[in-house]
Image: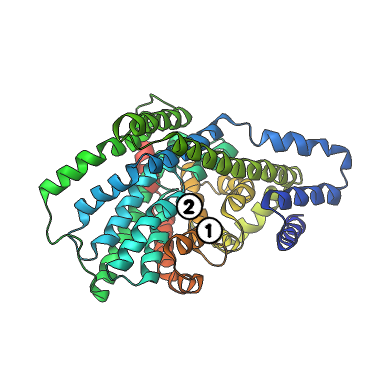
Amino acid sequence: MSLVLLAVFFIMLLTGLPLFTAMLATALAGFLHVGELSQLRIMVQQFYGGMEPFSLLAIPYFILAGELMGCAGLTSRLLRFAEALVGHLRGGLGYVTVVASVIFAGVNGSAAADASAVGSIMIPAMKKGGYPGSYAAGLTAGSSLIGPIIPPSIFMILFGSMTKTNVGALFMAGVVPGLLLAVAFMLMHRVSAARLKLPRVNTRFSTAQLLRATGGAVAALIAPAIIIGGILFGFMTPTESGAVASLYVLLVGLLWTRELTLAGILRALSNTVRLTSVIFVVMGAATIVGWILAAERVPQTLAPAILEFATTPTTVLLLISAIIFVVGMFMEEIAALVLLTPVFAPLASAAGIDPLHFGIVMTLNITIALITPPMGACVYIVSSVGNVSLEKMFRHIWPFVLVALACQLALILVPSISLWLPRTLGY
């Protein structure tokens, strides 16, 4: 059954159909295959039901907060703060890129948004500073992977909605892995900076400059604190924290930076509606396919076959990760997440894997697919905003993929990397 649906899905994509239409066609093929045409009404119920969970409301709020930050002039202030913090190191602009991605990750929860916002400013700056264009673009694309790991995270919201896992707990479980990913890219950049003899932005560290930059960026730095702190101390749900953060950025742009105009607000709302619509219709369509797979007991059939070869939680996660890595190279990331989660989540549960640990492994797996050829969305975004050819991007992206995979391996082998913080906080 699963092979039939997979074959139909890829055939639909090759015909040029939009992603959600291809999924709906796949679902229809599933109903035809099992001969249950009398249950076609279930397609409509599942389609809208897939968009109903309250936790999904957090997605448009986080997207809006990120969009408003750019329109309110907070993006440039954050980059100046990052430059003052690490610009004195050799290859300082590369460190600035990673640090900026960490800060942006605490607001919008989207790798694509990070790649666009940071890349549009930092890639031209790095190229002007003597960085090879392909390396600057690769570092930006790699750093954007931090976005869906450090809370908030759109991928975690979707995973939590589908598996009934506490989204707040997932957010906390992503903090340490996200910082691990950032440190790994910084270490890689340190080696590359020495090899390429990359310049420093600032000749020396300046406390006065850091204080000035912090003063300019403090309003922007409060936004991640609102989101993470509100969830951490139990004041707000993830959805409420997203709404409060959006309102906060709106007020900052209107009353403090005074760079947020009516046109900017309308542009942010338009982009939010467009991106949210794409996510929700894909979620609805994939829910139908997931229902068919569950009704045909595909996960229950698959579990014994996999557990026969993978007998420990670690080997199960390694096998699942290998499958997701290959699938992610050829499938859009949200589609891969919402299609594969209903299949692999029961398998992980049967293998005795903690739901939080599996959720972070799954999220990082899907996130890595954002920079793997030939479908990696962040590669295309960075190539466009940085004016770097796709051919060069694909040729030089693999070192960044390998660093991310090394972090994934560490996460699988040492579950406490993801479980320590949420367990300490009582989740």
Element on which disc 2 rests: helix
- Left or right of 401 on screen, residue 136: left
Q: Mark 1 and mark 2: span between their CA atoms?
A: 7 Å
Residue in the foreground of this view, choosing between 80 and 23: 80
Q: Around disc 2, counting alpha carbons within 10 Å, would you say few (fewer than 14), some (14 to 19), or many (20 or more)?
A: many
Q: Is residue 72 visible?
A: yes
For image coordinates 54% across by 32% down, the residue present is 57
Q: Report x, y in % for residue 94.
A: 29, 61
Q: Which mark is on residue 39?
A: none
Disc 2 target residue: 112
User: Sequence order check: which comes first, mark 1 or mark 2?
Assistant: 2
Instruction: Name the quadrant containing residue 44.
Output: top right
For image coordinates 61% across by 63% down, the residue present is 330
Q: Report x, y in % for residue 152.
A: 43, 40
**Colour mode of the rendering:** rainbow
Q: Is residue 88 above or below residue 348?
A: below
Instruction: Name the quadrant containing residue 306.
Output: bottom right
Residue in the foreground of this view, choosing between 153 and 299: 153
Q: Is residue 113 above or below residue 202?
A: above
For image coordinates 42% across by 60% down, the residue present is 141
Q: Is residue 117 above or below residue 141?
A: above
Amino acid type assigned to the residue bearing label 1 in the image: Ala
In the rendered image, the residue lying farthest to the top is 235
Q: Report x, y in % for residue 181.
A: 36, 55
- Left or right of 65 on screen, residue 1: right
Q: Is residue 152 visible?
A: no
Q: Quadrant of the N terminus?
A: bottom right
Element on which disc 1 rests: helix
Amino acid type assigned to the residue bearing label 2 in the image: Ala
Q: Report x, y in % for residue 262.
A: 45, 34
Q: Which mark is on residue 377?
A: 1
Q: Are discs 1 and 2 less than 8 Å apart at CB?
A: yes
